[in-house]
Amino acid sequence: AVLAALSGALAALVEDYGMILLLGCAFISLDLVTGLAKAKISGTVSSAVGRKGFWRKAALLAALAFGICMDKLMGVVIPGFASPVGRLLGLYIAVNEAISICENLDACGVRLPKILSSALESAGCKLNAGK
């Protein structure tokens, strides 16, 4: 019964948020891979840093799940209300991870078009303006 409930909940989330979840996981995975490549190339591989990064990524996914749950809750409390929390957190995560991926690739010697890194940095600054 518990497995059926979890499967139903996952199916409901994927229906509305499948692409956000997929892209969030993809960006996080790419950041982990490029971060590891950067550490290997620079000779700074550290288990402690790797564990810290892993748990930070787990917290990002938890934040995204929280945002999606908040959207669902707001839809129940205020029928017809389309809460943007999950989508905003998904965008925030994607932009920050993309910036980190570009930084990691640059440290690995991969040159990306300047317009890409500038656009991501600008978006990141705008997203972080409220901090």
Image (tube, grey):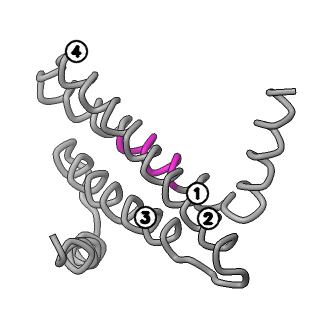
Tell which tag, 2 or 4, sits nearer the viewer: 2
Q: Earlier in the sequence, mark 1 or mark 4?
A: 4
Residue 120 percent across, percent down from the top left: 28, 72
Q: Which residue is mark 2?
A: 73
Q: Residue at x 27, y 56 (%)?
A: 102
In this rendering, is residue 5 above or below 73?
above
Image quadrant assignment for residue 112? bottom left
Q: Does the segment drawn in magenta span residue 14?
A: no
Q: Residue at x 49, y 53 (%)?
A: 66
Tell which tag, 2 or 3, sits nearer the viewer: 2
Q: CA distance from mark 1 to mark 2?
A: 6 Å
Mark 1–mark 2 CB contact (< 8 Å)? yes
In this rendering, is residue 33 above or below 97?
above
Image quadrant assignment for residue 76? bottom right
Q: Earlier in the sequence, mark 3 or mark 4?
A: 4
Residue 74 percent across, percent down from the top left: 60, 72
Q: Main secondary structure of the magenta part?
A: helix
Q: Which residue is mark 1?
A: 69
Q: Which residue is mark 4?
A: 47
Q: Earlier in the sequence, mark 2 or mark 4?
A: 4
Q: Earlier in the sequence, mark 2 or mark 3?
A: 2
* Residue type marked 1: Cys
Residue 78 percent across, percent down from the top left: 65, 80
Q: CA distance from mark 3 to mark 4?
A: 28 Å
Which range is magenta?
24-31
Tell which tag, 1 or 4, sits nearer the viewer: 1
Q: Which residue is mark 3?
A: 89
Q: Is residue 32 left or right of residue 128?
A: right
- Name the disc covering residue 57, or none: none
Q: CA distance from mark 2 to mark 3?
A: 16 Å
In which quadrant is the N terminus drawn? Answer: top right
